[in-house]
Image (cartoon, helix red, strand yellow):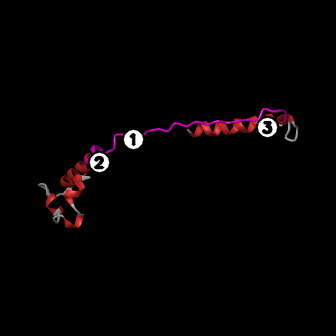
Amino acid sequence: MADDDDKGYRWETEYEKTWEELHEDESGSLKASIDDILHRAKKRLLTDRVTNVRLGMMRHLFIVVDGSSAMSDQDLKPTRLIATLKVNYTFLKFYVNRL
């Protein structure tokens, strides 16, 4: 934070002359100069990256199924328990493929 305070606001800094960084080569092309500027910008981005980046996410999933005698009712064919297991199986296949 102290570094930011020393610099002040952007409009308070000296005017940048960006055109002074561009130089023509023998053929009059600016390509080498532009490539050099882009290379330095990419290098700065790579060195300024935060090193404490998480690359993955750990997921935990708990499925709680009622195992009481009410699950043996046949309002869902063949039983509530079998219907619940089939739906959970379909869901888990989708869930695992999304990881």
- Image-based side of 9 in relation to 64, left or right: left
Q: Is residue 56 left or right of residue 25?
A: right
Find the residue positioned furthest to the right. Answer: 74
Q: Nearer the viewer, mark 1 or mark 2?
A: 1
**Considering the numbered disc 2 on the image, is that residue within a helix, a strand or a loop?**
helix
Q: Identify residue for label 2.
A: 45
Residue found at x 26% / y 52%: 1
Query: Label 3 is placed on what type of residue?
Result: Ala
For residue 47, which quarter of the picture? top left
Q: CA distance from mark 2 to mark 3?
A: 53 Å
In the rendered image, residue 41, in percent from the top left (x then y), is placed at 25, 51
Residues shaded magenta: 44-69
- Specify the amino acid type for callout 2: Leu
Residue 53's label in the rendered image is 1
Q: Nearer the viewer, residue 7 or 35?
A: 7
At a point 22% along the width and 55% down the height, the residue shown is 34
Disc tally is: 3
